[in-house]
Amino acid sequence: MNLARLVLVAHHERGEARTHALTVAKWCAEREIEFWMPVVDGDELEMGEYSSDRRLADADVVVSLGGDGTMLRSVDLLAGAAVPLIGINLGSLGYLTEVEPDTMCDALHRFGLGAEAGEWHLDERMLLDVAVNGTLVGRALNEAVVEKNQSGHTVRLLARIDGHPFTHYEADGLIVSTPTGSTAYSLSARGPIVSPQHRAILLTPVSPHMLFDRSLVLSPDEVVEIEVAGHRRADVAVDGQPHSVLSPGDVVRCSPSDATANFVRFGAYRYHQILKSKFGLADR
């Protein structure tokens, strides 16, 4: 694969981000690969000459320079486009990023200049289409969350599965997550850990004020709807980004997306080893 276009999405608050971004820009220039950055990234890193309002979908590869949050932002900016995504880790041990900065150029070379078959592969991750009152508002790699709008109060939410009422929740909120998101907000709400190679939808209550406090692991083909059923308003967020305030009667619909997030991997992706390191688990 001979790359022609590379776009870089960067974490603005990492001190070393500008240095590494300049390295990628130079690497591309030496190979006559078109390089650009989203306007806000280029401006924040004082690399305005590379700022562009072009879509990430126009690129042949997206490089995410940061941590898991930057990967989530990159997926959001791709808006469902099937463009390969390489994660360069500038944070602590992450779940999504794979490449360390000192091997960054080697990784770009292996991916972009026709490496032998088997040197890299795509790790396809499930996404959720998230709609509010019938209007698509985003695609979630981790989760969609409907939660209380007022501190100190619960919110009453009706969960429907495939159009059939399941139950009303009196809780701080409900999380609808993918397997990738099972180690994000859902985990902090005591949801199960699900391998990201699996396809499933998780429904996890946040601090439920009711006897039923378990997560549900649903089929990847099922559709979850959450209706604000009480008199209090609620907030909805997609992958940690607030979207809107919901009024009683509003409905958030979460369904499996036809799109996927396509992460570039350069070897066997051992999710369980990452999990072990993240939680400091001993061999015995």
Image (cartoon, helix red, strand yellow):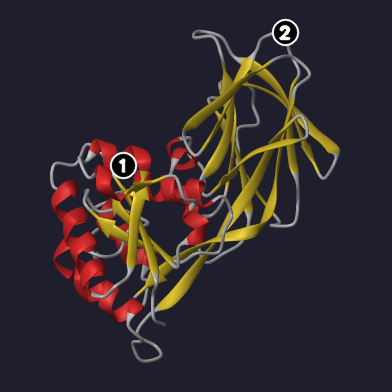
Q: Is residue 247 left or right of residue 37?
A: right
* Amino acid type, callout 1: Asp
Single out the residue that lies furthest toward the bottom.
Answer: 116
Whole-percent x and y of residue 169? Answer: 68, 25
How many callouts does the rendering have? Answer: 2
The answer to whether the residues at label 2 and label 1 have Cβ atoms under 8 Å apart is no
Dot 1 falls on a residue whose secondary structure is: helix
Residue at horizontal 44 percent and vertical 45 percent from the top: 53
> How would you rate the neighbour count of disc 1 (Cα within 10 Å): few for under 14, some for 14-19, many for 20 or more?
many
**Residues packed near mark 2 inside 10 Å, few (<14), some (14 to 19) or many (20 plus):** few
- Read off the residue under disc 2: 231
Question: Is residue 193 visible in this depiction of the protein?
Answer: no
* Left or right: where 197 falls relative to 33: right
Q: Name the residue rendered at 25%, 58% in the picture.
A: 277
Residue placed furthest toward the right: 164
Task: Name the one closer to the observer, 172 or 261.
Answer: 261
At which x and y percent is residue 283? Answer: 24, 66
Quarter of the image where the N terminus is located: bottom left
Position of 35 with respect to 133 (left or right) is left
Quarter of the rendering occupied by the C terminus: bottom left
Q: Front-most of 273 and 243?
A: 243
Amino acid under label 2?
Answer: His
